[in-house]
Every structure is written in structure tokens, then in C-alpha cells.
Amino acid sequence: MTYTHFTVETATPSIGAYIAGIDLNSELPKQAYDELKHALATYKVIFFRDQDLSNKKFHELGANMGNLEIHEFFPQLEEFPEIHVIQTKGGNTGTDRWHTDVTFRKEPSYASILRAIDIPTDGGGDTMWLSTHAAFEDLSTPLKELLLQVQGVHDMRYGMTGYLDTETVEKNVAKNPPMLHPAVISHPITGKPHLFINSIWTPAINGLKREESEALIKFLHEHVKKPEFQVRFKWQKNSIAIWDNIATQHYAVGDYNYPRVMNRMIVNGTKIEAYKA
Ligand SMILES: O=C(O)CCC(=O)C(=O)O
Ligand SMILES: [Fe+2]
């Protein structure tokens, strides 16, 4: 596709693109957002620099990308409850693990929009993403064929234990019981296969013997870490990243000691279907 509302510079062959020549403060036609959605589906994560937006304009960006969710337990702006405030001090944040967000839901969120409000002054606090399509394509044919036949277990308790108190974990698990998703999903827009197993929420593969499941899960959690599948983004004030949640995994690098503040919006869920070879 030729983009008419902005320029695109590819970050890596697998994933990521820098979008420039667009001012998100201006009144943009629907076509500009259609192009952004196309770029998002193509590059899986898109990056913007120097977008000095009011909360209203930031919210407008989100609303134009899709239906926004209000998250159960993240603090939010009073005026725009869909804008969540994520404050972390580095170290053991819980998001310093490769993951796809909320895969314990039947319909995990489709996209996330993150903007830097206050970032470490001495470097640190980058975010990384990987393409679950590239990770799948890199596997051998027999292993691909096995994965196409099985489902992953997605369990909130697995991801939250050790990060939240037992009462909070159990309250949330009661509302979100463990869920099965195909180990390889078909992307709802591109139709491409994506590995759908992640290290925060997926403790097991259904249908295998326990030892087989443990060995394969361990292998897959390591496999996705290949640098060839990844991109790393260094934040600046007024940087924005939009990622396709179900086409990627991400990792918030915890190498800082600073009250890092981000705003986040989430575009609501999308139906997950198995990839049919
Ligand atoms: O803080 C970040 O860079 C990303 C944290 C994260 O995992 C998320 O926002 O879903
Ligand atoms: Fe996340």
C-alpha cells in the first residue's frame, strides 16, 4: 500500500516501523486512520516521535483506532477513564517478561497505545516487541504441524502469582477462569499464522503429556527470544507506540530506578481463531 498521510521507515525486516510526517494534533481524515491501521497490521508495532498531545487529542487517537477498553485495575485519568496511568520504578515490574496482554480472556485486546509521559533521564526503560509470525515461521515443518493441532492453556493465576496478593489473584481468577486458545492463530486482518503461547499466561499445552508440554513450552518461551524476531524502542518524551497485541509479544526492560510514567489505551478484543494450514 502507498501511504499518503505519512512516511514509513521499516525498523527491522520482522517487525516495527517509524511513522513520520504526520501531526496527530491536526484534524485527520478517516483515510489517515485507515492507513495507520493498515501500517499497524503490516508492521505490528508503529512508533511516533514528538507528538505533544493533550489528553483530549491522545484520547481521540485511541477512539479513531477502535473501541477503547477500561481496564479493571489500572489507575485512570478522571476526565478520560480509557487513558490508564502506568507508573513503574524499574526492577521487578511484572512486565519485564515476554508476553501478550490479557490472553486469559476469550477475546484478548487487539491493540495497545502507549505514550511516554516521564521517562528515565539516564537511559533505560526501553520496550521490546517480537513478531509471533516470524517466531512461528522459523520453526521446522514437523513442529509447525504439531502446534497446529494443539491449544495453549492461558491462566491468570500462573502470571499473577508472586506479583499480586493471593486475595486479588483469586478474585480475578474467579472472574477469568483458565482458557484454551489455539497454539497457532490466524491473524484476523492478514490471515497469517502467529504463535500464540506466551511466558506470562501460558503454563501448558493442552493434549500433550505433562512432561511433553513442559519441554515444549520451555522451548517455545526460549525460541521467541531470538533477536531476529525483535525490535527495541528507546522512548523520548512524547513518543507513542501502537502495537498489535495478538500479533506480538512485548517486554518492558526493567533496567532503571526512576518513577517512569506512561499513559496507555487499549483497543478492545478480537475473536481468536485457529490457523488452518
Ligand atoms: O511499560 C511498558 O513499556 C510496557 C508495559 C506493558 O507490558 C504494557 O503496557 O502492556
Ligand atoms: Fe503488557
Image (spheres, rainbow, N blue to C red):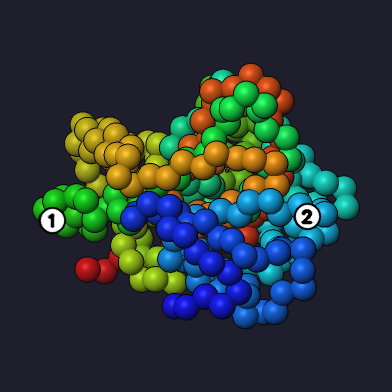
> Closer to the N terminus: mark 2 or mark 1?
2
Where residue 88 sits: x, y (%)? 66, 28
**Residue in view at x 68 percent, y 57 percent:** 69
Direction from residue 13 to residue 36 in the image, left or right:
right
Q: Secondary structure at mark 1?
A: helix
Q: Amino acid at mark 1?
A: Thr
Quick check: marks 2 and 1 in contact, CB under 8 Å? no
Where residue 266 sits: x, y (%)? 64, 55
Direction from residue 136 to residue 142 in the image, left or right:
left
Q: Callout 1 environment at 10 Å: few (<14), some (14 to 19), or many (20+)?
A: few
Q: For residue 214, which numbered disc appears in the image?
A: none
Q: Secondary structure at mark 2?
A: loop
Between 231 and 140, the one nearer to me in the picture: 231
Direction from residue 79 to residue 179 in the image, left or right:
left
Between 135 and 161, the one nearer to me in the picture: 135
Q: Amino acid at mark 2?
A: Leu
Q: Is residue 33 above or below residue 13?
A: below
Where residue 91 sits: x, y (%)? 56, 20
Q: Callout 2 environment at 10 Å: few (<14), some (14 to 19), or many (20+)?
A: some
Question: Which circle, 2 or 1, is nearer the viewer?
Answer: 2
Q: What whole-number distance in Å separates the C-alpha atoms at marks 2 and 1?
A: 47 Å
- Circle 1 sits on which residue? 141
Q: Is residue 229 above or below residue 106?
A: above
**Residue in view at x 56 percent, y 60 percent:** 19
**Residue in view at x 65 percent, y 66 percent:** 22
- Circle 2 sits on which residue? 53
Between 87 and 161, the one nearer to me in the picture: 87
